[in-house]
Image (spheres, helix red, strand yellow):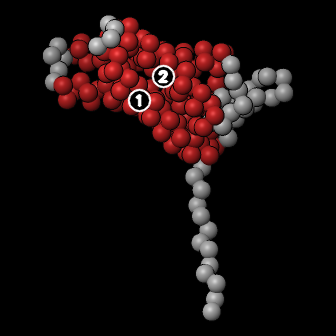
Amino acid sequence: MTAPSLQPTRTLHPALAAFVRFVICGGGVGVASSGVLVLLHDRMPLVLANALVTVVSTVIATELHSRVSFRSERRGWGVHLQSGLTVAVSYAFTTGALFCLYAVQSEPSALVQQSVYLSASAVAGAGRFALLRVVVFGERTAGGTRKPSFGKASVAMAA
């Protein structure tokens, strides 16, 4: 009788694995945030509830991305500020995409609006991932400066 042979397992490229973790963490926080927003809707004005949920969910997502998505040792308010700036850029990008849609088509259908918004969100999310991976949670040298990481994998992920 022979022992069963173990098949070698394939592991994901580190950048791809980080991206999968990023999507799961960010998506999970997004779904939870939408639920909290629904719960808060009757208790306070929607604008205030949305602002509160956005701030809290960004802080939570940043912690998750730091610890889980990028497995970084970086902590502190500076990381949260940098991550918050990437959220602001993403917001501006998705809003700009919708403004462009309304400039081209004054009354687009709900399907077109959602298609434009979700497409812009996907592009913004990929850009946010790249910024968080390279700038916010990127490896640092002993002096605190970022290590240059322009290998083939980094260039491929950026493209």
- Looking at the image, residue 33 sits to the left or right of residue 80; the answer is left
Residue 24 visible in the displayed image: yes
- Position of residue 66 relative to residue 157, above or below, is above
Q: Amino acid at mark 2?
A: Ser
Q: Amino acid at mark 1?
A: Ala
Q: Residues within 10 Å of mark 2 (few under 14, many from 20)?
A: some
Compare residues 136 and 106 and report the one nearer the observer: 136
User: Circle 2 — which element?
Assistant: helix
Residue 23: percent from the left, percent from the top? 47, 37
Q: Looking at the image, is mark 2 or mark 1 earlier in the sequence? A: 1
* Residue marked by disc 1: 32
**Residue at 77 percent of width and 23 percent of height:** 145
**Residue at 41 percent of width and 29 percent of height:** 32
Residue 126: percent from the left, percent from the top? 48, 32
**Residue at 55 percent of width and 45 percent of height:** 16
Q: Tell me the distance, in whole angstroms, between the alpha carbons under discs 2 and 1.
A: 9 Å
Residue 22: percent from the left, percent from the top? 52, 36
